[in-house]
Structures are given as structure tokens and as C-alpha cells.
Image (spheres, rainbow, N blue to C red):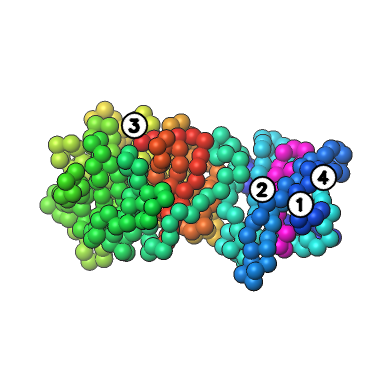
Amino acid sequence: MLTKIITVFTAMGMSLLLVNVDSYQLVSPEQSYPTANNYQTKENKSITKIKFGQTKDGQKVDLYSLTNTNGLVAKITNYGATLTELHLPENSGKLDDDTQYFTDSVNQPNFPSIILNPGETYRHLMVYKFYTKQNNLGEIIPPNTQIQKVAGGFKFTEGPVWHPDGFLLFSDIPANTIYKWQPEQKTEIFRQPSGNANGNTLDRSGRLVTAEHSNRRLSLTQKDGKIVTLASHYQGKRLNSPNDLAVKSDGSIYFTDPPYGIKSEQEELGFYGVYRLAPDGKLTLLVDDFVRPNGIVFSPDETKLYVNDSQRGHIRVFDVKPDGMLENGKLFAELKPPSKEGAADGMKVDIQGNVYSTGPGGVWIFDPSGNLLGIIETPEAPANLAWGDSDYQTLYITARNSLYRIRLKIKGMR
């Protein structure tokens, strides 16, 4: 009997799931079968099969879904018994019931025991998925939803923002380009050179506001295409390299200013701050004790501001005072799993106040109290994200060389 160990994240830490891979067997390579017998309850459960792809040598691969009496779903290919997904419907106080009694089987004698994680062997077979700590992502992600790659071949993608006219803008920092992507159309150049643009957003008039690394400024692209500088200096000294930004309903722009886009000898300020640019053009330093301030986003009611620190691997939250200043800064959440590529970076919120932050391994989703709901795993290390489509219910994710999207059950804040 062969047994493999799967790590399952729980509210209390990590739990191990032992899977007897000899018990999973394929009824037929050509059909889907409606039933399988559960050894414990004798109930009939469904097994479904779909085409999964093929290996590099042309071998066809199918994906089988098995469900136990507690609703746990395992998705396994017939190529090396690769386990691609586990779905836990509810684990509050009874994780063992959901996992260790997974006893459904079908009869197939040639299932060996290979279990993969993203980034390991047979990466081209992986379905990238989500996993949970407290399993509340069911209210956010529809069943069987998969992340989709919509564009690729870039150098380092960042700064996505959805335009109400039906297209997405995003940056490729090393390529010194802002691209325009539309469904069913080829990606085209929107602006080049871009000042090695990083973060992008829209102001209250729908104009593009950009954080430019190499130009060390915030810029505004006017309706006629003219580009003007909004902020480039603080108290007579050049900004480091503005990174990401968020616009408040009163028109003020909040942004982070780490040194990622410059050499150390080019620094003039001596700190890495978070700023507020008022509608009248006044620039105010809000916080100066970050190591690498990066992603920034308001809560739906704008009473809180979230800022993450890529170096420290955490998110801080501040109360926003009526005058726009910040107070009561405190730790909101940490993003520090081992052996995962990526860092705390771009952030967004949904209409319920959940916070989405790109981080190691994917997009981390926290509830308004800072509890981790789960992680949407991405094929490449993500850098930033944006809500899009006409209903703002699709999450677009820039990740290294590509652009991805995933359809969710909840709307994002515009």
C-alpha cells in the first residue's frame, strides 16, 4: 500500500492528510461514471472525468473528481495520480471528518503516487487553485473556478487598472511601457516610454495617474494625451521612485515611495514614505518608518488605509482622520510562508471590506479583521491586481511575465 502526505492549512496551523493512493482506481479511460461506492457509508457518490491536456510526449491526460460523504472533493489525473486540487466545504472543529475519512474509490490498478505542489515536477500539468485556512473562500470563489492566463511574453508586469470604456491598462516596468488589453483583441502599446511606470490608477475624472520609477514622479495623462507632473519633490528633494497609489473620493492621491527604481547613491530623502497629494497640489508626508512601502488601498468607507511593507512581509492599517491624515497605525496581517516566491505587493478590497494582497505564492485574502481567508495560487509570482469587467467582479492579476484573471462571486471596489 502506498501512502502520500498532503499538508492542509487549518485555523490552528497545519494538519497532515494521509492519502491511500492505491485505493483510487479508474473505472474506464473513455467514459464518465455516475457512481462510486463509499466503503464507510455504502452511499453512491459521483465520479466525473474531463480532458486535462497532454504531456510533453503527447500522452493524453484526464482529470477525475471524487467526492466523499463530507463533501471533500479531490481532483486527480490519470497521469501519475497527480493530485491537483482539494476542496474542503467546512472544517470548523472537525477537520478530521473532512479529510482522514476520504474513502471513495474507483477500480484502476495503475494509479501510482505522485502528489505535486505548484512549481515542482510536471509543472505543465498543474491546475492552479486556492487553499484555505478557515475555508471561507466559498463565499468569494465559485466552485471549480480556475485562474486564466490572458496575455504573456512580458518582462515584469505591474500596475493593472480597469478603464470604464472596457479595457485594462498595465505596466511592464523593464520594457518602459504601459500596455492596453481588451478581450478578444491583441494587446497594444498605450504609452512608450512610460518612465518605467509601476502603479496605475484613475482619478475621479477617469484620467490615468501613474507612479513612474525612472522619472521619480506621479504623472497625470490628460484626456488629450498630454502628460503632466503631479508630484516629483518633497521639501525640495526628489522622491525616491513612487510605486503604488490609491485615490480617495475627495480627489486626494495617496502613494508609496520605496527606492526600488533607483540606486542608493541617487537617494535624496533618506527615508521611504507614504504621502498624500491633496487636490490643491499640496504634498504631505504621512508615514516615514516603512522599510519598503508598497501596496496601498482604502477600505470601502475610506475610514482605514492599508499599506504593506514588502521587506517586512506584512500589512499595516491606519485610521484615516477627517483631514486626510493618518493615526493609530498597527499590524493588520503577515504574509510569510516558507519556500514561496513573491512578496507583499499590490492590494485591493472588495465591497465587503476583504483585503486582497499579492504575496508569496499568490493572492492572499484577509477579512476586515485581518484573518486569512485563503490564497489564490498563481502560476507566476504576482505583483499587483485590479478589479475589472463591466461588473467589477473579475480580478485581474499581473504576475511576472503574464496577465491573469479569475472570475469571483463578489464585486470589487472601483
Mark 2 / mark 1, whichever is N-terminal? 1
Residue tagged by mark 3?
302
**Any mark on residue 86, and which?**
2
Residue at position x 70%, y 44% in the image = 73
Q: Let me know if residue 74 is in the magenta part.
A: yes
Mark 3, other Cα within 10 Å: few <14 / some 14–19 / many ≥20: some
Residue 271: give x, y in percent of width and height. 26, 54
Asked if residue 318 lies in the magenta stretch, the reply is: no
Q: Amino acid at mark 1?
A: Gln
Q: Position of residue 62 (x, y in %)?
A: 69, 57
Which amino acid type is marked by label 4?
Ala
Residue 36, which numbered label? 4
Looking at the image, residue 222 sits to the left or right of residue 383; the answer is left
Total numbered badges shown on the rendered structure: 4
Secondary structure under tag 3 reads loop
Residue identified by numbered label 1: 31
